Amino acid sequence: MNQADQQPTHSQPTDALSEFWKNLKAAPRLLKETAFRTGKPTTDRSRSSFVFGNVFLHLHSVRTHRWSLRWSTTMGLGIASTSAFLITLVTGILLMFYYKPYTDVAYQSIKDLHFVVPTGRFIRNIHRWAANVMVICVMLHMARAFYTAAYRKPREFNWLIGMGLFVTTLGLSFTGYLLPWDQLAYWAITIGANIAQSPRELTDIHNITTWFDPGGLNRLILLGSDKVGPEALIRFYLLHIMILPLVLVALMAVHFWRIRKDGGLARPADATERVGETLEPVQPVFTEKPTKTYHLAALVKGRTPAVGNGPEGTVPSMPHLFYVELSVLMVTTLICLGLALVLDAPLKELANPSVPENPAKAPWYFLGLQEMVAFSAFMGGIGIPTVVLFGLGLIPFLDREKAGTGEWFGGPGGWPLVKRSIWIGLGAALLVEAFVIRFGWLREWFPGIPQLIITFVNPGTVLTLLYAAYSVWLVRKWNSTRAGALGLFTCFLCGFLVLTIIGTYFRGPNWEFFWSPADWPKH
Amino acid sequence: MTVKAGKPKSRLDPEPLPRRDFLGLASLWATAGALFFAALGMLRLPRTAVLSSPSKKFTASLPDNLAEGEAFVPPGRATAIFKDKEGVYAISTICTHLGCVVKPSAEGFECPCHGSRFHPDGTVAKGPAPKPLPWLKISVSGGKVTVDEGTTVKEGTKV
Ligand code: HEM
Ligand code: FES
């Protein structure tokens, strides 16, 4: 390198001051140009570059198939889940201005929020209802991904990411439930922590708890103590505002990215013909079907889903997809605001560790579990949920069929099979529950019966086995895994519904059955 | 260390990476191992070693008119103390199902959370509780009783 190379490039260093003024005047324009390098997004081409070049927008592909934009494809449920999450995020940050996670002041700080802080009650209500809306949307979204067989190849992995999102969502709601430190919170978390400890039901039977105690370890790490106290509150707070949101955001990023990389949403092979002519002419991007996609790193060949597909049936994501997303965001916000205006988030008396709330109920989406837990803590709280999650995770790897991908209730049997499964699922759950409520269960008939038998033979396991048997029968009848999966998923959904409704509306003090809360004994 | 690369597969996949790049693999695995053990070490932190809960031992004086079989629950404690001809005894009132506090009643104990019932001696009468309510260590001195909620004793131990 010689001296000459290090000279400044402009040769006349005379009028630096006027150069300075010129640059200063150009600064706003330059700022805009450097931020939006592809110019104003006004044409299809510049909009595409805009989506492609923006770190947030590029989670979308540049073009979206019109099948994916149909209301009936997604019902907007994934975006609604995302929207509800964003709402809880914003309102949650606002709540953090006042909330104090210490047992002696937590309850009071919620009361302050409710009665003193300007808009505090409204923000708290929105946070609470948006959290509920999120749980509902995530469940429905999962059901729609299942019923449209969208988990199939190449989307198996995204289904698993989705399950991670589902569990994280429930975790967020559950950890949030403790924070008000009222009676409801305290006893729900006591029960929850003891469910985490319930593997002891098995280790105790084998007398190995003293040296092998996964249950106790669970509880110790969750509570940081041997009872629900200040350590537990801090831990739940940390999980609620930090760990779980970070996990959720990371999983969401992968989830969205994967949708793009898996070739957009699942659709039937003939989707392009079925959505018909595009309203506006499609600008040819490629003159012929590309045999490779163009990629940042180099050339990608082979199996990316875009290879071999032209732009037929697609429209630019900006603005078409963005309009849809924004309108779902608006509707979700409207629902949350509406609920927050008419319904106040509950707050019971201050937590009292010596008198349980009676009945002590967990958040509604756990009441189905609580109903099963009322027979065996381990089976209802850990055993059956684990089996169900494991089964859900296996679905995409067992169902390798092709027929019906992207169609509602696609696959052999279709809607009639699902309809029959609804009746069977509801019927079996109602029968088992009615039997138990009327006649009791094993311990009432044989008082000395060992716990081990009840752990394995209880209404929850009986129901699970009934459903499993029905599903195996379906697989054989239709000679199709998908048919069995349709039946099983529908049955579990119905069972969940029945148990949740009974737990919510028909269980009173001492977890006894009542037709209505008006019949509850006065205390 | 030089390793011979394999044969090119195609124009687009020109050089398969050398599989046996010993140093590269060794450092990769060393890093993975170090991160793994660091993560394990970090898990030690949230696993509480010293429980901050208040002392499990407490002393109380029984009311003079405590009838036989009637439970006395010192305020703020999850222990029921009884007195009969054979002596005094203490039974924990923490439900063995999922940890709610049971209420002493004429027939024994009842749990509000999932309807477990216990006989007066703590054994399970009904419901999901998997184990009897434990009996706690109790001692009497000078008209006062001292209970250790952390130590269980055999059912039927009265002093
Ligand atoms: C916080 C929770 C979740 C969020 C925010 C979320 C978000 C989304 C969004 C925005 C989409 C695009 C299509 C649509 O709107 O339906 C999508 C697709 C998808 N999601 Fe989720 N999701 C969540 C949970 C889940 C769960 C629990 C599952 C199932 C276990 C799941 C499985 C899928 C699958 C398989 C697709 C691809 C669907 C297709 O190709 O048609 N997601 N998700
Ligand atoms: S906690 Fe007592 S019955 Fe469940």
Image (cartoon, coloured by chain):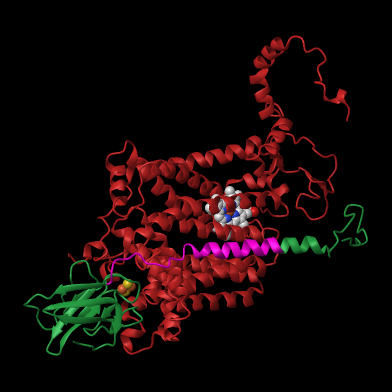
- Chain coloured red here: A
* Residue A42 image offset from top left, x and y in percent: 68, 27
Count of labels in the image: 0
Query: Please, is residue A109 above or below residue A485 in the view?
Result: above
Res B77 quadrant in image: bottom left
> Which residue appears farthest toward the front when viewing the image?
A3
Quadrant housing the N terminus of chain A: top right
> Is residue A506 on the magenta stretch?
no
* Residue B72 image offset from top left, x and y in percent: 15, 75
Q: Identify the residue shown where x is 68% and y is 53%.
A: A267
Residue A148, visible in the rendered structure: no
Left or right position of A344 against A328: left
Left or right position of A157 against B138: right
- Chain coloured green here: B
Quadrant housing the C terminus of chain A: bottom left
The residue lying toward the viewer, choosing from A121 and B85, is B85
* Residue A511 image offset from top left, x and y in percent: 30, 70
Residue B111, visible in the rendered structure: yes
Q: Identify the residue shown where x is 77% and y is 63%.
A: B25
Q: Identify the residue shown where x is 27% and y is 55%.
A: A348
* Residue A162 image offset from top left, x and y in percent: 58, 57
Res B33 quadrant in image: bottom right
Q: Which residues are magenta?
A: B30-56
Left or right position of B67 against A139: left
Left or right position of A461 against A358: right
The residue lying toward the viewer, choosing from A40 and B19, is B19
